[in-house]
Amino acid sequence: MERELPPNTSVRLSYTGQEAYHLPITTDNNEVPASTTPYVVPNNGYSVVSANTPFQNWLLLMESFSNGTQSYESGIAEVTHKTGHGLTLQANYTFTKNLSDAQGSDAPTAYASEEPYASEIANGFDIKYDRGNVIATPRQRAMVSGSYELPFGKGQTFQGPGFLNPVIGGWNFSTVTTLQTGEWLTPTEPPSDDQSNTNMIERSTGGAISRPDCTGSAIPSHRSPSNYYNVNSFQAPPTNAGRFGTCGLGILEGPGMVDVDAGLAKRIKISERMHVRVEATFTNVINHTNYAPPALNIGNPSSFGVLNTALPQGEGGNRTGQVAVRMDF
């Protein structure tokens, strides 16, 4: 739905919905169901797996099936404004919900297409155990971009002395500002803490990841970079519980990002066929610290939920800047 509003402004509201089927999921054909029956390898000199596994001559027997699904929905609001005074402004806001059980891992660090092939899931008997928020799709995202011809110089609102107008005139300011919530993260535990009796220690070599029990609110009452998530809200399942951990996939919203990029440029006419462009550009011009996702393995409580690393430069990291001169002819 789009509507034009005077003066020189248009508003657009849109909805996008998408369902995807037959996405690849990798499971271990030698996996046994979670139970209270201990997983014991007979001490007979030749067995490598428990007696209740389907294929006695194999440790891991991984196979990919096209039975994964994905559900994507988003609402988008856009505003575009143009004036005759050299100002162009475009802003958009997106609210998104993206769920999938085919992200390639029990605790994905990238979407499935970016994950190594044949990374098996922990519970092949219930693939919905791995259905959750897609890691790389933030719930909320706002972006503002615009350019403005500065009103200085000959023919502009503010004129200087004749000799100064060529210097102060013709400058253009531009910016791209992004604000978004964080990516979706998943708490994990050491495979030795798993209580499903499915040989998780060995299966972790094939990519299976163990998740703990969720026992309380993950958000501390006094949140800080050194205490972004409450490690005491997660614990290993009880001994010989015969099940996987209760924590879901993508249940923690990571640190958000505020990134203001800006530039100042001027085009100088030398002749009809020759121009010089002078520009200065900066990323994260306000030098806001945008943190990378923290470690989330409860086996290392001292580092769990601690924000101690900034995002890379150019992706919301520390401020960078450059000055350039370009000749076009």
Image (cartoon, rainbow, N blue to C red):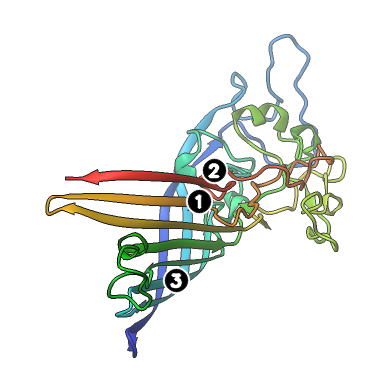
- Dot 3: within a 10 Å radius of its alpha carbon, few (fewer than 14), some, or many (20 or more) residues? some
Please name the residue shown 53% across and 42% down the image. 104
Q: Compute the Cα span from label 2 to label 3.
A: 24 Å
Badge 2 amino acid: Gln
| Image quarter of residue 309 | top right
**Quarter that holds the N terminus:** bottom left
Give whichever of discs 2 and 3 has the lower sequence position: 3
**Along the line of sight, the residue nearer the viewer: 20 or 196:** 20
Please name the residue shown 78% across and 44% down the image. 304
Identify the mark at residue 313; answer none if there is no mark. 2
Question: Where is mark 3, residue-wise?
Answer: 92
Compared to residue 79, the image places residue 260 above or below, namely above
Please name the residue shown 55% across and 37% down the image. 27
Badge 3 amino acid: Asn
Give whichever of discs 1 and 2 has the lower sequence position: 1
Q: Is residue 255 visible?
A: yes
Badge 1 amino acid: Thr
Identify the mark at residue 283; answer none if there is no mark. 1
**Quarter that holds the C terminus:** top left
